[in-house]
Image (spheres, helix red, strand yellow):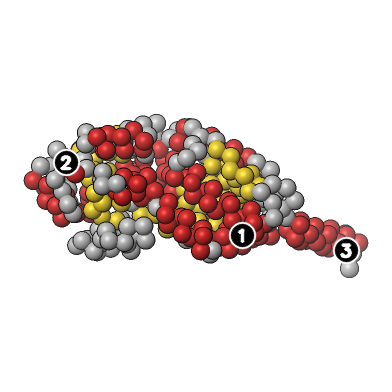
Amino acid sequence: MGLKKVLAGAVLALGLLGNAASAQDFPTQPINFVVPFNAGGGTDVTARIVAQEMTKILGQPVLVENRPGAQGIPGTRYGADAKPDGHTIVFVLQATMALNPSLYLATNYDPLADFAPVSQISESPYVIVVHPSLGVKDLPGLIALAKEKPGQVNYASGAAASHLASLLFQKAVGIEMNHIPYSGSGQALTDLLSGRVGVMLSSPVSVLPHIQAGALIPIGITGAERSPSLPDVPTVAESGYPGFKVSGWYGISAPKGTPEAVVEKLNQAVVQAIGTESVRNGLIQAGVEPKSSSPAAFSELIASEYKQWTALIKDAGIKPE
């Protein structure tokens, strides 16, 4: 064997040993968990529930850092640019990974190339809610009203994801409602609660307290199964539209280049955290359905969602702004 091959083999062996030792010692300092949205929102609540349990498992604080603004683009880019050693992870979701690249010219990251997926942490179908003043009690009632008054029933959306999910829903059930866009989900919800608009597709976490208070009526779930947080509300598929399914999701990624062994250790911590009763109950109470995955499975989900929603946005004639 030549000297060059011997040296190359030695360097490779040392590198592998170094990576193994690095993963074994990881984490050596607090982990920065970047959430690219405001504190107190659904993403923040979900992140903090998981982070608290990951802290116990990893033996280092997992500290949530909110970096809100511009549809989550700056915060997500900040996470992608962090040192790829596992001590910075970023909260990712359908909106930032699958929608932003086709909707906003300002998107300055590649969801498929700039991240090392760690694990999905939840799957969350939308809940279709109506204001009591609309006079609708269930999904067939809404569909009948919208067919009786085409284009006259107002629906709100404060985010691209809920708007696109609403378009898919209307196409599936054969109705056309009037879209009232808002700059944020909070403003949309305010007008829904006042009765200025009658319908909204929302993540359960945002509207659950208002449903419990009787201010809004849930009439349908867009997932394949009923939501644990709203077990009495039928799915759209159950209501006569088999095969219909639209769900949002949350997850955790690391910067591209993070060692695989470190990603695997992070994944094990996430999976273990989501497997605990306290975390599962906390997420369900927050309105999201716990669901972990392998890094490979989460990578496949991001890629498939990116492809699906990119095609939908193009077909709908929506231009990036």
Q: 208 above or below 284?
A: above
The location of residue 8, given as percent across then percent down, is 84, 59
Give the amino acid at mark 3. Val
Instruction: State left or right for residue 70 relative to residue 201.
Output: right
Q: Residue furthest bottom?
A: 1
Circle on res. 6: 3
Q: Residue furthest right?
A: 3
Q: Which residue is mark 2?
A: 133
Q: Which residue is mark 1?
A: 269
Give the amino acid at mark 1. Ala
Q: Is residue 113 visible?
A: no
The tag earlier along the polypeptide, 2 or 1, is 2
Q: Secondary structure at mark 2?
A: helix
Q: Secondary structure at mark 1?
A: helix
Q: Answer whether labels 1 and 3 touch (C-beta < 8 Å).
A: no
Dividing the picture into quadrants, the one containing residue 264 is bottom right
**Mark 1 → mark 3, Cα distance in angstroms:** 38 Å
**Mark 2 → mark 3, Cα distance in angstroms:** 79 Å
Residue drawn at (19%, 54%), measured in percent from left and top? Answer: 139
Q: Answer whether labels 2 and 1 touch (C-beta < 8 Å).
A: no
Residue drawn at (51%, 34%), measured in percent from left and top? Answer: 68
Q: Is residue 205 visible?
A: yes
Instruction: State left or right for residue 169 relative to residue 62.
Output: left
The tag earlier along the polypeptide, 2 or 3, is 3
Q: Secondary structure at mark 3?
A: helix
The tag earlier along the polypeptide, 1 or 3, is 3
> Which quarter of the figure is the N terminus placed in?
bottom right
The location of residue 137, given as percent across then percent down, is 17, 52
Q: Nearer the viewer, residue 200 or 92?
A: 200
Q: Nearer the viewer, residue 231 or 14?
A: 231
